[in-house]
Amino acid sequence: MNISDLLLDKSNSNVISEFANNFGVNENQAKDAISTLAESLSRGLGANTQDIKGLDSLMDALENGKHSRYIDEPSVLAREETVEDGNSILGHIFGNKDVSRHVAKRAAEKTGLGASLLKKMLPVVATMVMGSLGKKFLGGSKSISRQESTGFLTQLFDRDKDGSMIDDVLGMAFKAFMSR
């Protein structure tokens, strides 16, 4: 399972439909955009959770951010507060707007959608990622152990399924660096 799987799960069909309507695309285009953008967000989250401070920051955001509303109430995806929250999330994940622009440009190459549209979609997808992670991660419970959280994150970010996400994140970082 990965973040795209969480977002594109059939239980989120109303979220995908709302997202598609908000951006004037069909559902297949919405799924392509969500999947492609979520992949980049996943890499960023994986890199940020490699140390205890980053993992704690993500845990705090999941526990206190009330992000599940973006999945539970898809109508909030169209609100300006959602974009603001998404931009804040992107700031934590990517660090600066140049990375977000680069992500949108690369997503445009993969999806065929315009980079400017994908740049507008990116903060909304960021809120959806945090909402999906919060729902899956917390499962309605505020008490989750560090071991459980690390195991869950490893499952999401361990692409080669060797039990460690470190080599995967380093490989993704190297690929991103080499593609500049």
Image (cartoon, rainbow, N blue to C red):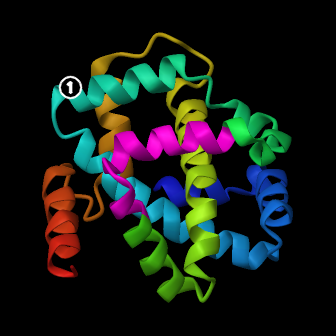
Is 43 drawn above or below residue 175 in the view shown? above
**Which residue, given by chain and number where applicable, does mark 1 sit on?**
53
Task: Tell me where the magenta segment starts and ends, as one range.
Answer: 82-100
- Dividing the picture into quarters, in which one does residue 59 lie? top left
**Is residue 151 covered in magenta?**
no
Task: Count all numbered tags in the image, as a single digit.
Answer: 1
Q: Is residue 3 left or right of residue 145?
A: right
Quarter of the picture holding the C terminus? bottom left
Is 46 drawn above or below residue 147 in the view shown? below
Q: Where does residue 111 sit, x and y in percent of width and height?
A: 57, 84
Residue pictured at 75% horizontal, 51% vertical:
12
Magenta residues, dominant SS class = helix
Q: Is residue 82 visible?
A: yes
Residue at the far top in the pictured view: 143
Q: Where does residue 33 sit, x and y in percent of width and height?
A: 61, 71
Residue pictured at 84% horizontal, 56% vertical:
18
Q: Where does residue 135 sit, x and y in percent of width and height?
A: 61, 32
Is 118 drawn above or below residue 143 in the view shown? below
Q: Element at badge 1?
A: helix
Q: Where does residue 127 sit, x and y in percent of width and height?
A: 59, 43
Crowding near the residue tagged with mark 1, few <14, some 14–19, many ≥20 C-alpha atoms within 10 Å: few
- Report the front residue among 76 and 155: 76
Residue pictured at 63% horizontal, 61% vertical:
121
Q: Is residue 6 visible?
A: no
Q: Is residue 150 left or right of residue 173?
A: right
Residue pictured at 42% horizontal, 79% vertical:
106
- Report the front residue among 85 and 59: 85
**Is residue 97 covered in magenta?**
yes
Task: Inspect the image, locate mark 1, and give the three-letter code of the amino acid beneath it.
Answer: Lys
